[in-house]
Image (cartoon, rainbow, N blue to C red):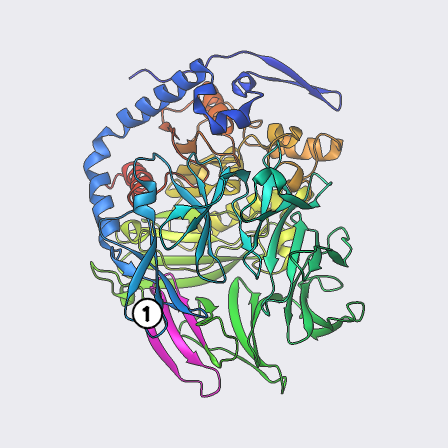
């Protein structure tokens, strides 16, 4: 089949007195946000090109159809298809969710305390029936248990519509509220809901209060963010006494609070300061604050409600330890810390101030978690749990006083799983500047460490996001076929604290790419794989990482899988009308206003730095309705790669025409996407 070719229409661009030519920028439409809502507005010739690429990809993947089906059945066979969550005890009801063997979406159930009658108050499969895409943004039952507020996106573009229905008869009782961020907060008296409205750039910068029983045109604007970098939302306090308005960007936050939903008078808690983040909660007469003010890796503070100017440290900062968030009970605080790319949990007695670590498992490389059992905080019982790359999730009911723990749920793998068949290892390797980069490796015990194995190296490392050592039954389809799975915890995450993030963003972003390449070379040296046998995997900002290292070190790789990749980052950064650009000035820089930022981003942008050389096998996927990484970024990237690359390796491009940033909706569709990517990995590894 003929290789698709996107038409070249050279456009001269100029910024900071620097000129360059972009042959494919014409595909970006000025009304792109309208296209996200209505794909009929897509340029016909662009649609034709995307369809050609999809056909070309399908033709080249034709011989993997049986393997894709086998992978699909394998992965689905490891999922308990009919499953329920643990119940949460509210004031009058137990609430939980369920998914069935026949379904693709979850159902929400409840049962009155003391009753045996179960009520299904939300059926995702019924709601999604006949829709090509279906995503729930938020779902919230009113405090009196009579009403359900929920938000829906039917395009994948994350423009959510809010609906309110009466649970007793499923009747929608309010007007549809369109173009929201999706989040919903009930007032404590159930007279109002609060929601964030999206502006023309798809940014939630206005908060409205809707009074039930009144037209939405009368909704009250209670807060408006004037800084285009910031977005805002509403939350409530643990003691149900306050409402919080949080406005923030990636590195700075500001909070207002009020306690009367009828007569709203927001009061500023702490004025925003560049680089200072904080969040607050209310409990037992105190505001509790999690902040990095004078604490690089955060601390927990508190102050009396009546004297917010007198803030004192409660959990002080620790060297090389990231102090995480917390949950408050009547007598206890449960909190987290992170160091060396591993999370720990602690429980603290609020009266005696004694604290101890919650030891959950005998494994070292784990991802622990904690959740509440009930709404009433006057309890000594919580749920704690953990998972690891080889151990499916386990949840225990834990008594803080007696330290007794009872296993209440374990993630089942119906087709069978023996964790002793797998080996999990943690390494640290020296990067170019001596910094120790953690790597988490999972392999089958029968896989030889002699350089003969293929290895999939996953990476993300942007926005301070971490990749926890979690269990994934899907990965076993590769690991069981002697493909080692490794995760590179590069700078740009907060795996080693806030410095780890700062050393991998802005004018240090190239450290992320160098760290990843270092990890690849380290794993080759240790015999886990060999040069030319590594498959890179990354999505979104992880796709930026993949694209950058491809240009720097293509010979290390057998192939690359790039999902919704952020590969035309210079163009996006220069366009301040796009949804995420302004909010990322402190992550990547502001190329439009700052020449130094411009030159630095241009020097690593995957699209700008494609070379006339050999590239490995590459699979790129995108979605037409993605508002975070517009489809035209990977589209341009693939077109330019086709023009420049000198090899005869595969370059496949797949565009989902009815999906968003997270791909298609529904359980089966998600498994199909994973099966497709894994089939590509097995094909280039010559395992099929």
Residue 588 visible in the displayed image: no
- Residue 46 in the image, given as x and y percentages of width and height: 44, 17
Quick check: 475 left or right of 539?
Answer: left
- Residue placed farthest to the right in the image? 309
Residue 207 lies in magenta, yes or no?
no
Q: Which quadrant holds the C terminus?
A: top left
Q: Residues within 10 Å of mark 1 (few under 14, many from 20)?
A: some
- Residue 138 in the image, given as x and y percentages of width and height: 47, 50
- Residue 162 in the image, given as x and y percentages of width and height: 49, 43
Which of the pair 466/143 is nearer the observer? Answer: 143
Label 1: which residue?
409
Q: Quadrant of residue 22?
A: top right
Which of the pair 441/305 is nearer the observer? Answer: 305
**Could you tell me how many numbered marks the image carries?**
1
Kind of element beneath mark 1: strand
Quick check: 557 left or right of 227?
Answer: left
Residue at image position (54%, 11%) is 9
Q: Quadrant of residue 385?
A: bottom left
Which of the pair 81/318 is nearer the observer? Answer: 81
- Residue 146 in the image, given as x and y percentages of width and height: 43, 58
Q: Which quadrant holds the N terminus?
A: top left
Residue at image position (41%, 32%) is 620
Is 552 rendered above or below residue 367? above
Magenta-colored span: 382-408
- Residue placed farthest to the front in the image? 213
Residue 384 lies in magenta, yes or no?
yes
């Amino acid at each position: 089949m003929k290789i698709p070719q996107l038409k070249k229409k050279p456009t001269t661009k100029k910024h900071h007195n620097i000129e360059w030519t972009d042959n494919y920028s014409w595909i970006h439409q000025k009304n792109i946000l309208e296209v996200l809502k209505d794909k009929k507005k897509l340029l016909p010739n662009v649609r034709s090109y995307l369809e050609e690429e999809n056909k070309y990809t399908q033709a080249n993947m034709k011989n993997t159809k049986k393997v894709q089906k086998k992978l699909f059945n394998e992965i689905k066979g490891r999922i308990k298809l009919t499953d329920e969550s643990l119940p949460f005890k509210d004031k009058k009801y137990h609430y939980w969710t369920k998914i069935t063997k026949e379904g693709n979406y979850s159902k929400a159930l409840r049962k009155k305390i003391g009753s045996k009658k179960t009520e299904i108050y939300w059926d995702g499969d019924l709601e999604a029936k006949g829709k090509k895409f279906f995503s729930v943004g938020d779902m919230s039952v009113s405090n009196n248990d009579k009403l359900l507020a929920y938000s829906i996106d039917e395009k994948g573009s994350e423009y959510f519509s809010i609906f309110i229905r009466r649970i007793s008869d499923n009747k929608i009782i309010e007007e549809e509220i369109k173009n929201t961020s999706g989040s919903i907060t009930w007032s404590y008296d159930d007279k109002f809901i609060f929601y964030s409205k999206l502006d023309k750039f798809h940014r939630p910068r206005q908060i409205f209060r809707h009074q039930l029983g009144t037209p939405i045109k009368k909704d009250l604007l209670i807060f408006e963010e004037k800084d285009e970098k910031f977005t805002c939302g509403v939350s409530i306090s643990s003691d149900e006494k306050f409402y919080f308005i949080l406005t923030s960007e990636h590195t700075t936050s500001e909070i207002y609070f009020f306690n009367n939903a009828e007569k709203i008078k927001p009061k500023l808690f702490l004025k925003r300061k560049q680089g200072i983040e904080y969040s607050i909660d209310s409990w037992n007469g105190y505001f509790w604050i999690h902040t990095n003010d004078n604490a690089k890796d955060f601390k927990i503070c508190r102050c009396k409600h009546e004297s917010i100017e007198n803030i004192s440290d409660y959990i002080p900062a620790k060297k090389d330890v990231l102090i995480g968030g917390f949950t408050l009970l009547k007598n206890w605080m449960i909190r987290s810390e992170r160091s060396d790319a591993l999370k720990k949990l602690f429980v603290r007695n609020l009266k005696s101030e004694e604290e101890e670590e919650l030891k959950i498992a005998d494994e070292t490389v784990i991802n622990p978690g904690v959740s509440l059992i009930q709404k009433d905080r006057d309890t000594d019982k919580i749920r704690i749990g953990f998972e690891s790359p080889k151990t499916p999730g386990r949840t225990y009911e834990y008594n803080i006083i007696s330290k007794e723990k009872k296993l209440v749920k374990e993630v089942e793998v119906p087709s069978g799983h023996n964790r002793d068949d797998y080996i999990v290892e943690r390494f640290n390797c020296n990067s170019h500047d001596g910094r120790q980069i953690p790597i988490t490796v999972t392999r089958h015990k029968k896989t030889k460490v002699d350089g003969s194995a293929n290895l999939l190296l996953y990476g993300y490392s942007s926005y301070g996001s971490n990749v926890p050592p979690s269990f994934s039954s899907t990965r076993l389809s590769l690991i069981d076929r002697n493909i080692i799975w490794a995760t590179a915890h590069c700078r740009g995450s907060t795996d080693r604290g806030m410095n780890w993030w700062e050393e991998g963003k802005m004018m240090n972003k190239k450290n992320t790419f160098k760290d990843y390449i270092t990890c690849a070379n380290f794993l080759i040296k240790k015999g886990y794989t060999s040069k030319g046998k590594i498959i890179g995997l990354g999505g979104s900002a992880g796709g930026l990482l993949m694209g950058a290292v491809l240009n720097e070190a293509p010979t290390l790789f057998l192939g690359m899988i790039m999902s919704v990749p952020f590969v035309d980052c210079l163009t996006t950064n220069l366009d301040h009308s796009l949804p995420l650009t302004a909010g990322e000035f402190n992550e990547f820089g502001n190329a439009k206003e700052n020449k130094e930022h411009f030159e630095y981003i241009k020097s690593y942008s995957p699209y700008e730095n494609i070379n006339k050389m050999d590239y490995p096998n590459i699979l790129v996927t995108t979605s037409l309705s993605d508002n975070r990484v517009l489809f035209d970024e990977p589209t341009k990237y693939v077109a330019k790669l086709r023009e420049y690359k000198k090899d005869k390796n595969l370059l496949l491009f797949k565009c989902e025409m009815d999906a968003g940033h997270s791909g298609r909706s529904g359980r089966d569709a998600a498994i199909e996407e994973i099966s497709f990517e894994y089939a590509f990995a097995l094909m280039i590894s010559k395992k099929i």
